[in-house]
Image (cartoon, rainbow, N blue to C red):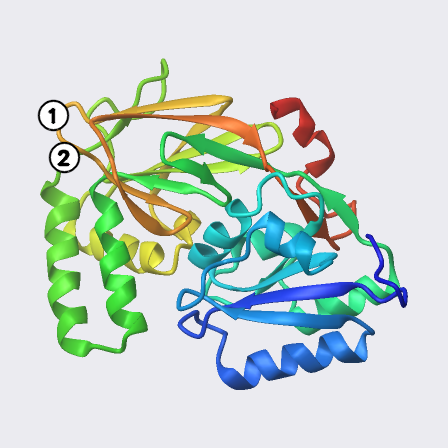
């Protein structure tokens, strides 16, 4: 990592008060942790009321490290905004699921990650990501009518009980009756399709899983998993790992689509490819625990 004139790394912090673990007290505690670790906090951006910094702004501020303390959606926006920058990005767990932070650091707190930066040299890595026509997905894609469960999750986040009840009822109905999606690859799951297909980047390919339900009770159980973005707990089929995943809606309808938990307008056919992140990310996870990051360059 580069050093400023007094050998202390300069940090630009991005946070989002609407993220799950990102209230004012948490942000202040994070700032103290940076100060106690010897970092210089040059600026704090509160997203989305303030735009995420650009590479030129970071360079003008002589910034060494862009720290992002937010959920997966804000993480997506801030990381992709600095693709091509020569510095490094530090994802920190400031949201609900914190998928990118867990991939790089494990399931640990932001304070522990900062402490690790002081104790041992962190690695700059370029992990595999998902290339889509909408841009890059850092942590995963969900396609199909099950994407509507994102609206239930937002109602939960807003603590709006009436909206939560209404959107849950709508999500169950839409998941059961909405146009399914299927994987075009040969021998890739159910021919009738799925309520949701997830695509997750790994060094050796895009892990693809199909989520279904045979009864209303199963849909309700799967919905809880989808709300929390813990897809592994829902009933599903493993559809393999691929360098390219082609999904279609046999009915020709636009498919529901979430990229890093944020909604996008899907078409009847979507293609996802293995790619490499466009900026260095700081990784503190032990090499014995890592998700084979070192081979990411092969996907460029």
Indicate left or right for 169 with 93 as reference: left
Indicate left or right for 176 with 203 as reference: left
Front one among 43 and 151? 43
Front one among 100 and 86? 86
Front one among 212 and 247? 247
Q: Residue at x 36, y 35 (%)?
A: 134
Q: In which quarter of the image is the C terminus?
A: top right
Q: What element carries label 2?
A: loop
Front one among 273 and 87? 87
Local crowd size for mark 2, using a 10 Å CA cut-off: few (<14), some (14–19), many (≥20): many
Indicate left or right for 244 with 300 as reference: left
Q: Are marks 2 and 1 in contact (CB under 8 Å)?
A: yes
Label 2 to label 1: alpha-carbon separation: 6 Å
Return the x and y of residue 97 as percentages of the image width and height. Answer: 47, 61
Q: Is mark 1 on a helix, strand or loop?
A: loop
Kindly identify which residue carries mark 1: 251
Indicate left or right for 187 with 85 as reference: left
Residue 73 lies, with reference to residue 126, above or below; the image says: below
Return the x and y of residue 137 as percentages of the image width and height. Answer: 46, 40
- Quarter of the image for residue 112 reads bottom right
- Quarter of the image for residue 161 reads bottom left
Local crowd size for mark 1, using a 10 Å CA cut-off: few (<14), some (14–19), many (≥20): few
Return the x and y of residue 156 as percentages of the image width and height. Answer: 28, 71
| Residue 192's disc number | none
Q: Which residue is drawn at 61% across and 67% down?
A: 13
Residue 136 lies, with reference to residue 156, above or below; the image says: above
The mark nearer the N terminus, 2 or 1, is: 2
Return the x and y of residue 16 as percentages of the image width and height. Answer: 46, 69
Kindly identify which residue carries mark 2: 179
Residue located farthest toward the top when viewing the structure as drawn: 186
């Amino acid at each position: 990592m580069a050093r400023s004139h007094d050998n202390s790394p300069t940090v630009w912090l991005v946070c989002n008060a609407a993220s799950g673990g990102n209230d004012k007290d948490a942000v202040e505690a994070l700032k103290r942790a940076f100060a106690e670790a010897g970092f210089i906090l040059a600026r704090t951006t509160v997203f989305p009321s303030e735009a995420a910094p650009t590479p030129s702004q970071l360079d003008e501020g002589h910034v060494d490290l862009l720290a992002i303390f937010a959920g997966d959606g804000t993480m997506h926006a801030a990381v992709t905004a600095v693709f091509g920058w020569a510095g490094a990005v530090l994802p920190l767990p400031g949201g609900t699921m914190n998928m990118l932070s867990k991939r790089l650091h494990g399931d640990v707190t932001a304070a522990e990650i900062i402490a690790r930066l002081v104790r041992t040299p962190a690695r700059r890595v370029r992990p595999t990501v998902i290339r889509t026509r909408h841009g890059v997905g850092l942590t995963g894609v969900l396609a199909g009518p099950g994407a509507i469960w994102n609206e239930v999750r937002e109602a939960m986040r807003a603590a709006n009980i009436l909206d939560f009840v209404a959107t849950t009822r709508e999500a169950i109905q839409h998941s059961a009756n909405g146009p399914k999606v299927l994987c075009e690859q040969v021998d890739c799951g159910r021919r009738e399709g799925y309520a949701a297909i997830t695509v997750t980047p790994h060094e050796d390919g895009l892990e693809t899983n199909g989520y279904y339900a045979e009864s209303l009770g199963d849909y309700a159980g799967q919905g809880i998993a989808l709300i929390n973005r813990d897809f592994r707990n829902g009933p599903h089929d493993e559809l393999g790992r691929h360098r390219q995943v082609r999904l279609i809606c046999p009915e020709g309808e636009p498919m529901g689509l979430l990229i890093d938990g944020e909604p996008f307008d899907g078409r009847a056919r979507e293609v996802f490819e293995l790619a490499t992140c466009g900026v260095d990310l700081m990784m503190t996870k032990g090499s014995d625990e890592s998700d084979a990051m070192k081979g990411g360059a092969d996907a460029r």
